[in-house]
Amino acid sequence: MKRIVSGIKPTGSLTLGNYLGAIKQFVKLQEERENDEFYLFIADLHAITTRQIPHELRKRTLDIAAMYIASGLDKERTTMFIQSEIPQHVELGYILQSNVYMGELERMTQYKDKIVKGEDSITSSLFTYPALMAADILLYDADYVPVGEDQKQHLELSRDIAKRFNHYYSDFFTVPEPIIPSVGARIMDLQDPTKKMSKSADNPKGYITMFDEANIIKKKIKSAKTDSIGIINYDPIKQPGLANLLNIYASATDKKVEDIVSQYKDTDYKTFKEDLGQVLVDLLTPIQEKYQELIKSKLLQEILDQGRDRALDYAFKKMRKCKKKVGLGRK
Ligand code: TYM
């Protein structure tokens, strides 16, 4: 039996990138791996590394939980919980901060990007964020961590931290493997296909959220930036906008990019975009309907209560052993 762990940070609305890169993959893994255990959390502690409005943060935290379930996650087989309800994440995060170097944290792209942009209000928790992320994973002895491409660097650091700890204190943490999907791992901005689709982008036309209504989804796809070549072909260098749309289509339908290209090669961008808009509406509408049923339900609260209790049980035992190993406390 293997344990699979992943999380999503409740900043901004969930995007199609989060869905195709992470949620959909998680659901798929769960269908494929019947005997494995799944831990899934909403990383609210990570969210406050940048300023959040408290009631909005709380709402988005529940939104993600409801969206996970609405996306087809098997609630019986998933330990779903809210990160801040398990204090051991912070406890282990601190211990792991003492096992990672400033130079390693300085090399993290997420942090470097903020420095390059000249942002001056970078919190110290944003800088040490990767140690908390390593704690999220190592606390549960995760074997696999399904994430999108942008989290690969954090995963590599988590592996390095685990190995360093194991080397110094003797074997203790499972060294986790990332699972990154072959299609959908990097969904790009619809207006600027050189940037990843992100909930914090300035232009809302660049991303589709999981809450967008049908006509908005279709409009955003229709106005997605393409090129003047006008031929349906997969070329991420010369036709990055179109390549992104083809990836979205492939990931949403589980079809191969080359099959989609041959299906549409004698048509035009307009036809392709109209069909893609419909594909996404068909994909997201049933999820949105289930989300509406769940968001105010007692069931959602029960799932989170049960998830918290199960996660706490594991985390408490692991941390007790960890502190002993490090020499903290009396015994
Ligand atoms: P976050 O909240 O930014 O993103 C959540 C998941 O969505 C994926 N993702 C994408 N995939 C494809 N295309 C995109 N445009 C796109 N945007 C986001 C991310 O790769 C991720 O899998 N630090 C993490 C949250 C976290 C975590 C963890 C994840 C905290 N602790 C432990 C795994 C294990 C984050 O900020 O993801």
Image (cartoon, helix red, strand yellow):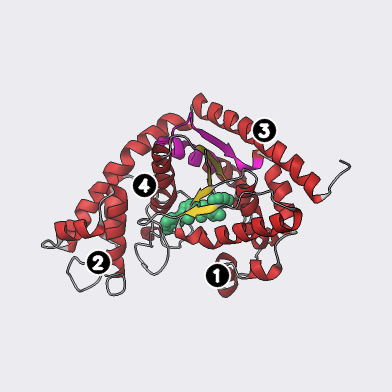
Q: Compute the Cα span from label 3 to label 4.
A: 38 Å
Q: Which mark is residue 113?
A: 1
Q: Could you tell me if residue 11 is visible in this image?
A: no
Query: Which mark is in front, 4 or 1?
Result: 1
| Horizontal and vertical percent position of residue 238 | 28, 75
Disc nearer the start of the sequence (4/1):
1
Q: Is residue 103 magenta?
A: no
- Dot 2 corresponds to which residue? 234
Q: Compute the Cα span from label 4 to label 2.
A: 27 Å
Report the amino acid beneath label 1. Asp
Location of residue 246 by image quarter: bottom left
The outermost residue toward the left is 266
Q: Is residue 319 left or right of residue 182?
A: right
- Residue at coordinates 31% horizontally, 74% vertically from top-left? 237
Residues in magenta? 61-84
Disc nearer the start of the sequence (4/2):
4
Q: Nearer the viewer, residue 156 or 120?
A: 156
Please state, as top left, top right, bottom left or bottom right, where the C terminus lies in the image: top right
Q: Could you tell me if residue 57 is visible in this image?
A: yes
Disc nearer the start of the sequence (3/1):
1
SS under mark 4: loop
Q: Is residue 299 left or right of residue 107?
A: left
Figure check: 246 above or below 84: below
- Dot 3 corresponds to which residue? 313
Query: Which mark is in front, 3 or 1?
Result: 3
Report the amino acid beneath label 4. Asp
- Dot 4 corresponds to which residue? 212
Disc nearer the start of the sequence (1/2):
1
Report the amino acid beneath label 2. Tyr
- Residue at coordinates 31% horizontally, 55% vertically from top-left? 248
Q: Is residue 72 magenta?
A: yes
